[in-house]
Image (cartoon, grey):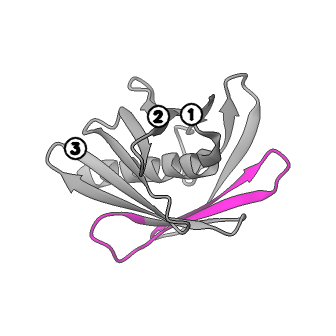
Amino acid sequence: MKKLYFKEKFFKITDHYPIVDENGREVYYLDQNFTLVGYNSNVSDGNGKNLFSITREIFTLLPRYQVVFSKGTNMTVQKKFEFFRHRVDIFMSNGDNLYLDGDIWHLNFQVINKEGALVGEVYKKFFSFADNYELTIYDENYDQELISLVLCLNNMVDLEKATSN
């Protein structure tokens, strides 16, 4: 089990920040590309090696993201709406689909694999000026997938904030 922390900057046009472990070490780095429409970002490791890229599809009713990993796999992250709950389905190219289930306030989410086992949890800090997330990874085989999921989730939250304003 390991924990990672995501902390956005308060004033931003695009996101550029480190993802740190429980000891405060920068283990990953997010670099969002500037786009007028959509979302496009890359995540690299501490050595600068690109691990995966995320792109939000533009012409969809609910947000849908394509994640391409440098290890040769990819996944689609699709937001679904259910009454008073948000559900996110994750379709992976290797068939090992994941499911994200959480409450309407975007505070607590669990990531479950197709066998029903808990592989990770996401918590959003409620009282902060910028978005802060804690990711607990229970199955490290899914570490990159879980990191990309948090970033997609954060973009979904940002989209909802922009729409409500």
Seen as rendered, the residue at the extreme right is 47
Residue 18 versus residue 91: which sits nearer the camera?
A: 91
**Is 33 left or right of 158, judged from the image as shown?**
right
Residue 31 versus residue 122: which sits nearer the camera?
A: 122
Find out whether the residues at labels 3 and 2 contact each other: C-beta distance under 8 Å.
no
Magenta stretch, residue numbers: 38-64
Residue drawn where x is 62% and y is 45% of the image? 143
- Gap in Å between the C-alphas at discs 1 and 3? 24 Å
- Gap in Å between the C-alphas at discs 3 and 2? 16 Å
Q: Mark 3 points at which residue?
A: 85
Counting other residues with Cα less than 10 Å from the Cα at mark 3, is it few (<14), some (14-19), or many (20 or more)? Answer: few
Counting other residues with Cα less than 10 Å from the Cα at mark 2, is it few (<14), some (14-19), or many (20 or more)? Answer: many
Percent across and percent down for residue 25 are 76, 29
Regarding residue 90, the answer to whether it shows in the image is yes
Q: Name the residue under label 1.
A: 138
Q: Is residue 59 magenta?
A: yes
Counting other residues with Cα less than 10 Å from the Cα at mark 1, is it few (<14), some (14-19), or many (20 or more)? Answer: some
Instruction: Assign the N terminus to one quadrant of the image.
Output: top right
Tell me the amino acid under the disc marked 3.
Arg
Mark before the other along the chain sequence, 1 or 3: 3
Regarding residue 67, the answer to whether it shows in the image is no
Residue 65 versus residue 138: which sits nearer the camera?
A: 138
Mark before the other along the chain sequence, 1 or 2: 2
Q: Mark 2 points at which residue?
A: 121
**Is 141 left or right of 119, judged from the image as shown?**
right
